Amino acid sequence: MSGGRESELLRRRQEALQGGGAERVAQQHARGKLTARERLEVLFDAGTFQEIGQLASHRGDVPGLEGRRAPGDGVVTGWGRVGGRTVFAFAQDFTQIGGTLGEVHAQKIQKVQEMALRAGAPLVGLQDSGGARIQEGVAALDGYAGIFRRNTLASGVIPQVSVILGPCAGGAVYSPALTDVVVMVEGTSQMFITGPDVIRAVTGEEITFEELGGARAHYTKSGVAHLVAPDDRAALELVRRLLGYLPANNIEDPPRAEPQEPDPQAAAGLEAVVPEDPNRPYDVRRVIDGLVDAGSWLELQGGFAQNAVTGLARLSGRVVGVVANQPRTLAGTLDIDASDKIARFVRLCDAFNIPLVTLVDTPGYLPGRAQEHGGIIRHGAKVLYAYAEATVPKVSVILRKAYGGAYIAMCCRGLGADVAWAWPSAEIAVMGPEGAANIIYRREIEAAEEPAAERSRRVAEYRERLANPFVAAERGFVDEVILPGETRSRLIGALEALADKREERPARKHGNLPV
Amino acid sequence: MIRRYRVRVDGQEFEVEVESLDAGVAAVGTPAATGGVPAAEGAGAVSPVPASPAPAGAPAEAGPETGGAVPGGAGEEVVAPLPGVVLEVRAESGQRVREGDVLCVLEAMKMENEITAPISGVVARVAARPGEAVNTGDLLFVLAAG
């Protein structure tokens, strides 16, 4: 009786699995890209992907699309397992109507967004689309709007990761922008609001797709891309690794792993990383390497605002978010971009119950007209807001310089650090010794027979008396002065003690983050 | 002595360096478009006008900053990322450098900031001079790719 239906089902399934057909699939491969289904196979544990909406299709009555069958409507949706844990995903299929977004395509994405949110499981969006399906007009625009709204409602409830694996242009960029982490592939992925043609027409400027919106541009200049990978497979492997640091939702704690010792060479070198001369730069990632479990460091936004370093790592198996100043770039100052980077990362960690470890070595805010007129006041305020708002365990370690407003911003005790430590090399003060001595001892320096000698004597006196960790420790602003070699075990102990930290806040609609 | 001028041509702004030479001939340095290009992003800024080569007959020892002219203006500009004083210049004109090599040390914010080569190539021009105060976006070097 149902023999006809069964064979039709099998035929339709077979048709859906072909995507846009052999020719288009060959084109996709020739570009160095995988198909939507191949990508899902890499993303999920083998054999765990379950599809929904395989038979969905655009309404046949759309002008320009009559008679063009597109089973799945250019997007593959469903769920599977990543490292044994449930994850929902959608993958746009560029081989089918260019992966363009029409009404049904959007409905499928929205459905899987809702399922992920209800199930309390992460959502991964694989973007490879020609944009809005022009033939479907306002229905396509409404489709994007519904996706953006669901991205927003899920923000801070479930982790949302976007992987850009092809074009992602115009309004489409805002779904990734609303998610927690954006991964791009070098050479084959682009994101931009207005493309090179529009730019040429409006401003006369010549720029290629890759220069404008390629992975390099967004990894180093705009800060849109958190991670980049050389190809599709590497990008998806990176997503699998990233999900291993994140809980399924905001109620869960991040997954713990087997404790690992730090890299022995990095740990042994920890005492010598920070140069004695406070004017000497160094790479703060060597400190991070010496503290965290070997191989656990996953830096996010590593190419952007390199004067700050942000990333996920493990300390004795427990996931932590590390924020550090980077003295070897822009002297480790805080500027607009670094402020945005730190604030966003702190909020990611707070949303997903990841304790924060802040490593401080900053001379202050970057001076200059561009910074002031660019709004460093507004942007810098985000760092204060994010740290003060965060209720996860917060531990700060002052490695060397912690001056003025930047001391406050880098999660000092007064801002809400649960534990604040300083290394013996720390200089904590309102300003650096040179500037401070010039102000405090101005009269003495002016009256001296040899002002230069008097100045350097006063600078040394200031450094000796005030710019050290002991004044702060005597007043309790620093809980303990600790040695570099003790830092890892101290951190592990503090995070253990703070694991069940609860901090209640008054109910409110939401705070008003300065943006 | 190099002097900086801002020149507006057809509504587009150029930053021009003019250097007075012994012979009284002015050599025009690589212009950098300033309109619309954020100062901090200066590296890789496209210069719309090709750099003029040093005029023939210019004295050979015109100073370290008159390195080889950038062919066709296609050079990677290395600019000061923050305001400070050039402490030490470690690269000279014509020197081959690799990406990440230290070109000069810029003392700023009480830090000896190492300014590194953004690309591998040849130092086409050395604008940085020890002891000179520079502002964010000021030209330090021009590198020719290759």
Image (cartoon, coloured by chain):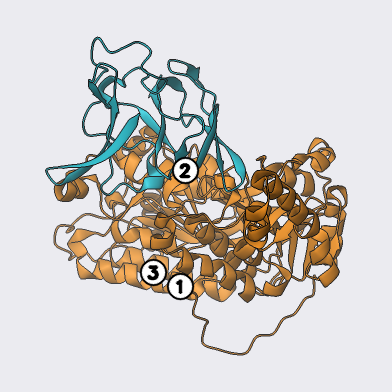
Mark 3 and mark 1: Cα distance apart in space:
9 Å
Q: Is residue A160 left or right of residue B23?
A: right
Q: Looking at the rendering, in which quadrant would you find the C terminus of chain A?
A: bottom left
Inspect the image, locate mark 3, and give the three-letter code of the amino acid beneath it: Ile
Mark 2 in CB contact with mark 1 (< 8 angstroms):
no
The single residue placed furthest to the left in the displayed view is B10
Q: Please identify, in this view, whether the residue under mark 3 or under mark 1 is nearer the observer.
A: 1
Mark 2 and mark 1: Cα distance apart in space:
36 Å
Q: Is residue A440 left or right of residue A170?
A: right
- Quadrant position of residue A87: bottom right
Image spot of residue A124 (x, y percent)? 51, 58
Identity of the residue drawn at 44% across and 65% down: A178
Inspect the image, locate mark 2, and give the three-letter code of the amino acid beneath it: Pro
Instruction: Name the colour assigned to chain B in the rendering.
Output: cyan
Label 3 CA crowd tier, 10 Å (few <14, some 14–19, many 20+): many
Q: Looking at the rendering, in which quadrant would you find the N terminus of chain A?
A: bottom left
Mark 3 in CB contact with mark 1 (< 8 angstroms):
no
Callout 1: chain: A
Q: Is residue A371 left or right of residue A279?
A: left
Q: For residue B81, which numbered disc appears in the image?
A: 2
Inspect the image, locate mark 1, and give the three-letter code of the amino acid beneath it: Thr
Element at label 1: helix
Label 1 CA crowd tier, 10 Å (few <14, some 14–19, many 20+): some
User: Which residue carries the number 3 mark?
Assistant: A147
On whether disc 3 and disc 2 are found on a single subunit, the reply is no
Element at label 3: helix
Q: Please identify, in this view, whether the residue under mark 2 or under mark 1 is nearer the observer.
A: 2
User: Which residue carries the number 1 mark?
Assistant: A152
